[in-house]
Image (spheres, grey):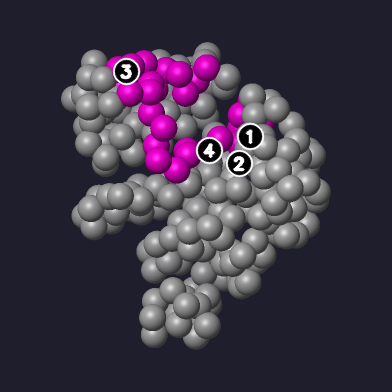
Amino acid sequence: MLEITGLRAGYGAIEILRGVDLAVGAGEIVALLGSNGAGKSTLNNNVCGLFKPFGGTVRFDGKDIAGAAATHIVEEGLIQVPEGRRVFPNLSVRDNLELGSYRRGRKDRARNLDRVVDIFPRLKERWTQSAGTLSGGEQQMLAIGRGLMGEPRLLILDEPSLGLSPLLVEEMFALIGRLNTDGLALLLVEQNVVQSLAIAHRAYVLENGRIALSGRASELAENPELRKSYLGH
């Protein structure tokens, strides 16, 4: 579904990504792992049209989307849940969710609202509450729910476990697994190496703007270089 080849990108004259190759197939969970500053969010922002790449190609379902408008990319069904949740704090839970269908999924908005609250019953309990007053875990549920309202064909989750308690992290990864079981392809961008590799089909490790390792997630979990760098043993 998503095919990135030789992607070079950055900000101003500073090049962050130096020729990244990455692919996500239909029905896959692919993990993109790396420490802070490795270039993970830069990749997301260029794939999703928030910035224009310096070079390389980005294809979604066979169509070249490198440098396309973010609105067009969302309309195609490639949707990002950004790092830091980015909910609209002064709007209600319901209003935040409805905004998720602004560009895509508007026709089935009522059905999708029902689906999201079926996945996240807690959001129904907070229906009229301002999003800024929710807990961190609830805001993450809301951000993912808002993404689902756009009927994604591929959903990019940028650091979904960031700042959550260990129990909520477990719940978040279980949810990601359920969404994938329902057929949704996901690109999971994470620092949480152990749980990401446990749930993903394939994975890439990004270091200093380049792919340092890639392969089946089960094999990378046993890779001595990765274990030493990220797990300390």
**Neighbour tally class for label 1: few under 14, some 14-19, many 20 plus, Cα within 10 Å:** some
Mark 4 or 3 closer to N-term? 4
C-alpha gap between disc 3 and disc 1: 24 Å
| Depth check, front residue: 140 or 38 | 38
Task: Check disc 4 and give the amino acid type.
Answer: Gln
Task: Check disc 1 and give the amino acid type.
Answer: Leu
The spot of residue 225 in percent (x, y) is 52, 83
Identify the magenta region.
Answer: 73-102
C-alpha gap between disc 2 and disc 1: 5 Å
Task: Check disc 3 and give the amino acid type.
Answer: Asn
Mark 2 or 1 closer to N-term? 2
- Residue that label 1 marks: 50
Regarding residue 1, the answer to whether it shows in the image is: no
Would you say the residues marked 2 and 1 are in contact, meaning their CB atoms lie under 8 Å apart? Answer: yes
Would you say the residues marked 2 and 4 are in contact, meaning their CB atoms lie under 8 Å apart? Answer: no
C-alpha gap between disc 4 and disc 1: 11 Å
Query: Residue 45, which numbered label?
Result: 2
Would you say the residues marked 4 and 3 are in contact, meaning their CB atoms lie under 8 Å apart? Answer: no
